[in-house]
Image: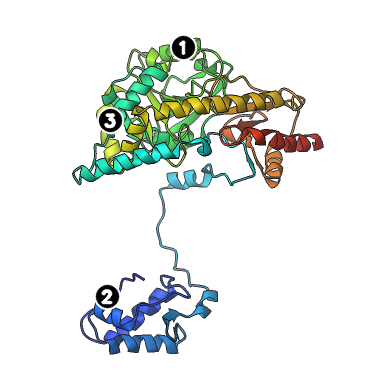
Amino acid sequence: MELHLTLDGSQDLAGQLYRQLRVAILDGRLAAGDRLPSMRFLAVRLQVSRKTVGEAYERLAAEGFLQGKVGSGTYVSARLAAVERPRPAAAALRANPHWRAIAADWQPFLQQAQRYSFAGGTTDKRRFPFDAWRACVQRALRLQARSPAFYAEPLGDPELRLAIARYLAINRAVRCDWNDILVSQGAQQALDLLARVLLEPGDLAVVEEPGYPPARAIFSAAGARVLGVPVDAEGLRVDLLPAQARLVYVTPSHQFPLGQPMSLQRRLELLEWARGRQVLIIEDDYDGEYRFDGRPLESLQNLDSEGRVAYVGTFSKTLFPELRLGYLLMPPALRRELTAAKSLADRHSASLQQLALAHFISSGAFAKHTRRLQREYAQRRQHLLARLCGDLGGWLEPLPSVAGMHLAARLRQPLDTRRLCARLAERGLLLGDLASFYAEGPAMAGLLFGFGAIETADIDPALDILRELLSQG
């Protein structure tokens, strides 16, 4: 057991030790049943006599805090397990009122494990090639062991940034110089850095309605006024954008959560609207690797000729969520400020994971993994669509979607979706409610079906439960 104890001076050493141990027990640092160090060990460590330690132990034992066990040692009394610890008085500290409001509204995406999970934005960790990843991590450890003991580059490991740039150029039609790549702690940090650098209190940030709640919260946390602009079948309604907007956040490849891609015409309209304005467009391409129908449209970043699009991506949706690595293709005009913001935020992302991921990509393991998942997800998506358009078609209408790891479906008849999702959870089925992604105006009544985490064989049993509850009304 490690316990910090300090004796001051040479007066009343036994009393000092008694009081410190007593406080450690009362505040829970020493719990009921914990074994204390032997008197000999503690005496040597504190440079006092065994008699001094023995007096402190005896006094605590007499008061019921300690109990000795013959041949075993001295332990914190088991009777203290039932004693309620006194809570410290609340400190006279007050958070920034702005953050108090955000904390009151913020609901993180914490999803309880269920037998059947249609959770959105979650990849299939069971399909991940951990043997190949383990080899990449071991290689990274060897490289790290030979490198100097110092902080890495704030923008990220050059090998990884180069691998990301090549991947984006080949697979996502994105023009980029690897020097403009910033490796972030997931897409979430990339959005946070952009908000810190660009937004001032009172600035107007535009998000899609419905849209991704964490993005709205990040911009609000930066002190911005956040406005949701509706989307239609072609994407964000550019004709409704306010002239004073400082930032526009969009998900053009696979609108979150409705699923439709932004049309080429609408992309060009958005860039034309931004021309001549001091506005940043954030293109979040969160799961565009997985495309099932049609040809991919050009990215906003590739269509942009003025350097006003920040392109954001993540590996949490292609590898596994716990790997908190993403990337930001920085507009050249913001590179210096974003580098400083990243350095101040956390100096740099975890270098071991960066080295491992760089080799995972350059070795071809990443491409092989995404191709395998593409085939698997295509089967799940087709199976899900067959049911939504078949026996569930009387209740649900799937919305058009050509990419990504989830499908949205509109309810054909009025129904309390929140109550429905709660009843499904009681039956072991996790399903998303489209209403939770609306922050302004009336919400579309519908459900979100993520197929990244559920096995194909589990789709029918899960949808049978949904059909049963829908039949009950």
Please identify the residue farthest to the top as the structure is shown.
265
Q: Is 209 positioned to the left or the right of 433 in the image?
A: left
Q: Where is residue 243 shown, x and y percent of the image?
A: 43, 19
The residue nearer to you, when weighing 97 against 144, is 144
> Mark on residue 404?
none
Residues under numbered marks 2 and 3 in contact, where contact means CB atoms less than 8 Å apart: no
Q: Whole-percent x and y of residue 115?
A: 64, 44
Q: Residue at x 39, y 41 (%)?
A: 134
| Cα–Cα span, label 3 and label 1 | 36 Å
Residue 40: quarter of image: bottom left
Q: CA distance from mark 2 to mark 3?
A: 48 Å
Query: Does 62 appear above or below 72?
Result: below
User: Considering the numbered disc 3 on the image, is that residue within a helix, a strand or a loop?
Assistant: helix
Work out whether mark 3 precedes mark 1 in sequence or the reverse, and give the earlier one: 3
Q: Which mark is residue 6?
A: 2
Q: How is the image coloured?
A: rainbow
Residue nearer the viewer, 412 or 299 = 299
Q: Callout 3, which amino acid?
A: Glu
Q: Earlier in the sequence, mark 2 or mark 3?
A: 2
Query: Percent x, y for residue 436?
Result: 60, 36
Q: Are marks 1 and 2 in contact (CB under 8 Å)?
A: no
Q: Amino acid at mark 1?
A: Glu
Q: Which residue is mark 3?
A: 159
Identify the residue at image location x=38%, y=36%.
325
Tell me if residue 279 can be seen.
no
Q: Is residue 10 above or below residue 127?
A: below
Residue at the spot of label 1: 269
Tell us which disc is closer to us: 2 or 3: 3
Residue 472 visible within the image: yes
